[in-house]
Structures are given as structure tokens and as C-alpha cells.
Amino acid sequence: MTQSPDIDATRQWLKALSSRRQQLQEPLAPVVEGRLRRIVGMMIEVEGITAAMGSRCAIETGDGGWLETEVVGFHGDRLQLMATGEMVGIKPNARVVPVASDPSVPVGDGLLGRVIDASSRPLDGLGPLQTHARRPLLAHPLNPLQRQPIREPLDVGIRSLNGLLCVGRGQRIGLFAGSGVGKSVLLGMMTKHTEAEIVVVALIGERGREVKEFVDHILGPDGMARAVVVATPADHSPLMRLRAAWVATAIAEHFRDEGRQVLLLMDSLTRFAQAQREISLAVGEPPATKGYPPTVFARLPALVERAGNGPAGGGSITAFYTVLAEGDDQQDPIVDSARAILDGHIVLSRHLAEAGHFPAIDIEQSVSRAMNDIISKPYRLAVRQFRQLWALYQQNKDLIAIGAYQRGADPRVDEAIRLQPLMTAYLQQDVDEGVTVDEAQQGLSQLLSLTSQPT
Ligand SMILES: Nc1ncnc2c1ncn2[C@@H]1O[C@H](COP(=O)(O)OP(=O)(O)OP(=O)(O)O)[C@@H](O)[C@H]1O
Ligand SMILES: [Mg+2]
């Protein structure tokens, strides 16, 4: 019996159907891509794709390469991106594709002695980083009720800070100063002489030349041995300058969670705020306070709150943030905001620096809010006595200089004049010299034992 032609046709049809079904089971990956529609200043608008805030996209450049960008906002159906590097080679209608990115940071002892950029790429030419763990770039600060209070002193190696301001483990301090008055040198001295086991230094928005100068000359091999430097010079994109602060903080958190005492030095908080301002203004956020949009003032505490003590028995992050402040300028909103969110401030004076008095710490204007919890009552009284004598001399300095002050007129002023050379010597310190907390406290007690009058 021969088969009817209908059955053959049905068989062929079934075969075709099954091959089609197979194709359907292995669908081709969909191509997701958008198009570049507009660029205004640093802000790039893209249509046709969606991606989460903070995620990465790549834009095809004319030469076949790709420009890395980050999603910083959206407007209707359009994504707003900002380039992480130089915006060169991109053309109208260029292809834009989302990129899988991992917002985490390599961490571990392999970072010690290394200089990296905000993308955790080595800048020091010492080969790849030997790290095996990663940590989220952005994390929530610890629950404030679970943190250990600030009770232990941290030796920062500087006599006037150890003796008169008494920095506590887990304290966050602002270093307020104008340009060129010795911030970098002071941070370098702390890195070399502190008792902290790990020092994480973030150089944000410095001149490129200064990064090398800081690493080679100010820190040197001794300072680098237990330090990690995260550097983004001023010519890097604001995204990278912002990121450097988060990267350094995440690295410090890693070491703290291992139970170590960490010193985090950030130079500068002002440049971090300025980077956030550039980004916020570019995506159209209106400026509120002296040209700074509100996001800036939300970011500052979000950054600073991640430093501090860990839970009981754990490590600590003691942090110094430099803040650019010229003279008596109290109007700068970053200065104001930093003063409010930090646990103390150290003011460097241009006047002292010009007179060759280094470190140029203006002891009258500097305050540590944690000091009373760290030192004993008798020592607190000694600090107060030093401050009073120093202030007394400063108040009468002009009269003394022109010879208008008559010795004997006020015994307390006489005392201040007598001790002034010793007090000045106490406040000054050579770059290569480290002074421990014990030495600083003994030095102060010895100096005050020379007083004859209770002040
Ligand atoms: N402890 C010190 N002993 C002697 N000289 C010092 C000391 N600290 C700072 N200086 C002098 O002050 C100069 C400026 O110091 P430094 O670079 O630390 O300032 P800065 O505040 O970091 O400046 P910038 O705002 O430009 O970053 C140094 O080149 C040095 O000559
Ligand atoms: Mg500097």
C-alpha cells in the first residue's frame, strides 16, 4: 500500500514545526541599546534604555572605543549620564549600552603601601593589587546605639594635638585652613608618627604634582608601609573625585571591621562637596545655599557618619577631614556644615605659618568635643591653665611688643610673658619628630610646674 500524499505533507510540516520550536527555545539575546540625544555641559542625555541610578553605561566613540559613564539622574524617558573620564570622541546619535558593573571595592592587606585611583587601579606602577575580598562602595553607617563611645585616646604623634586637644579613637575632626598653611605636611606627620595600625589617605582634587610630592617626600617609605593612598587629582571628573572619598571610606571600614585602629585622612572635604555640586548643578538641581544644591549637605553627613568606632570590642576609624577656610570666613556653607557634623575642629592659622610657627595650629580656636571623656580631671585643669596663659599672652602681645606693658602690673600676665618661649616651643614641632601622648602630657605638666601663680 502506498502512502497518501497528504500524510507526507503533514510529516514535512511537523518537521518544520519542530525545528522552529527549537529555534524558539534558544532565543537570541535581545540587543538593548539607546541613542545619545543631547549633551549640555557635562550632562549626557540618552533615549531608549533604562538603567538604575549609579549604574554604568558605555557610549560608543567615533574610533570604535567606548566611553564609560554613570547614571546620575533621569528626565522623563531620558537617562542622564556623566562621563567618568574625558568626554572625547562621542557623536550625536551614538550607541549607548548598559554595562554590568559591580559597585564594590577591592580590600585587604594587599592595599598597604599602594597608591590607587578612584577606580581602584594602581597608580604606582607596582603591578596588580594582591587583594582577594571586595566590599560595597556605598554602605549604611552603623547603628549609632551599637557604636562604642569615644573613650580611648589615639596617639597622632603631634605634641599639641596629643597634649592639648586629645584626639579620641573614633573621633571625626575637621582641619580648617586656607591654602598653603601646612595641611599636607601635618597629615604626613600624623601618618608617620601615629600609633594607628593602618592609615588611609584620600587625596581629592589636589594638583596632580602634589600627589607625587605627598607620597614620595611627605610620606616617604616609612609612612607608606602601613598606608593606602587613594588619589584623584583636580583634572579627574567630579564623579571620580566623589568616588575617591567613598573608596577610601570603604577601605577604612574593612580594616576597622577586622578590629584594627584606622586613621582616615581626607584632603579635602571641600573638594568632595564641590564635586557633588558640579554633578548636582549639571543634572539641574537648583542651588540653595551660596551656590550649593541641597544634595551636597546631605552627602557630607552620609560620608562622615561612616567613620567612627565600630561595635564593642571592634576597631575604630579616627578621621581628619580638611576643610578650606580662608581667614575668619565663617560664611562658607561647607565650613558651617562641617563644623556642625564633626566632633571637633582644628584651625590652622596663616598668621602663624607666615611667622614660621609650624604646625600652625591656632590653639585658641581649636576645640575637641570628645576631650572631656578621654582625659582625667586634673589633666583637664592643666590643659585649661595652658590655654589661659597662652590666651593672656596673645591678648597683651601688642602692648608687650611696643613696651607699653609694665612688668608687675598683673602677675598673671608676667607669668604668661615668662612662660611664653616655653609654650611656643611646646606648640612647635619638627617634621621628623614624633611625640607620644605620654610625652606630650608629661611635657605639659613639666611646663606648668614652672608656674608660681594659680591662674
Ligand atoms: N611642619 C612644618 N615645618 C616646616 N615647614 C612647613 C611645615 N608645614 C608646612 N610647612 C611649609 O609650608 C608649605 C606649605 O605646606 P603644605 O603643602 O602642607 O600646605 P597645604 O595647606 O597642604 O597647601 P595646599 O592648600 O596648597 O594644599 C610647605 O611647603 C612648607 O614649606
Ligand atoms: Mg596640601
Image: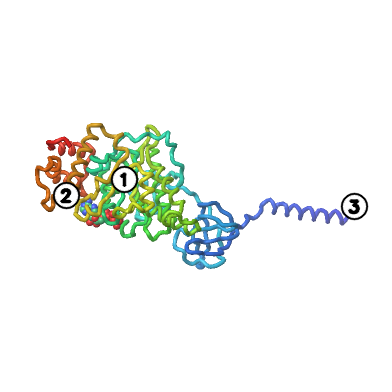
The picture places residue 59, in percent across and down from the top left corner, at 52, 61
For disc 2, the neighbor class at 10 Å (few under 14, some 14 to 19, many from 20) is: some
- Residue lying at 32% horizontally and 48% vertically, measured from the top left: 113
- Label 2 or label 1, whichever lies nearer to me, is 2
Residue 303: percent from left, percent from top: 41, 46
Q: Amino acid at mark 1?
A: His
Residue, disc 3 = 1
Using the image, determine if residue 1 lies above or below residue 170: below
* Mark 2: C-beta under 8 Å from nearest atom of ligand 1: no
Residue ID at (27%, 56%): 180
- Residue carrying label 1: 345
Q: Secondary structure at mark 3?
A: loop
Under circle 1, the secondary element is strand
User: Which kind of residue does numbered mark 2 sit on?
Assistant: Lys
Tag 3 near tag 2, CB within 8 Å: no
Describe residue 73's horizontal placement relative to residue 402 as left or right. Answer: right
For the point 58% across and 62% down, the residue is 35
Q: As drawn, which residue projects farthest toward the left?
A: 407
Q: In the image shown, does 290 or 371 lie closer to the viewer?
A: 290
Q: Residues within 10 Å of mark 3 (few under 14, many from 20)?
A: few
- Which is more foreground, mark 3 or mark 2? 2
Kindly state the secondary structure of the residue where label 2 is placed: helix
Residue under numbered circle 2:
397
Mark found first going from the N terminus, 2 or 1: 1
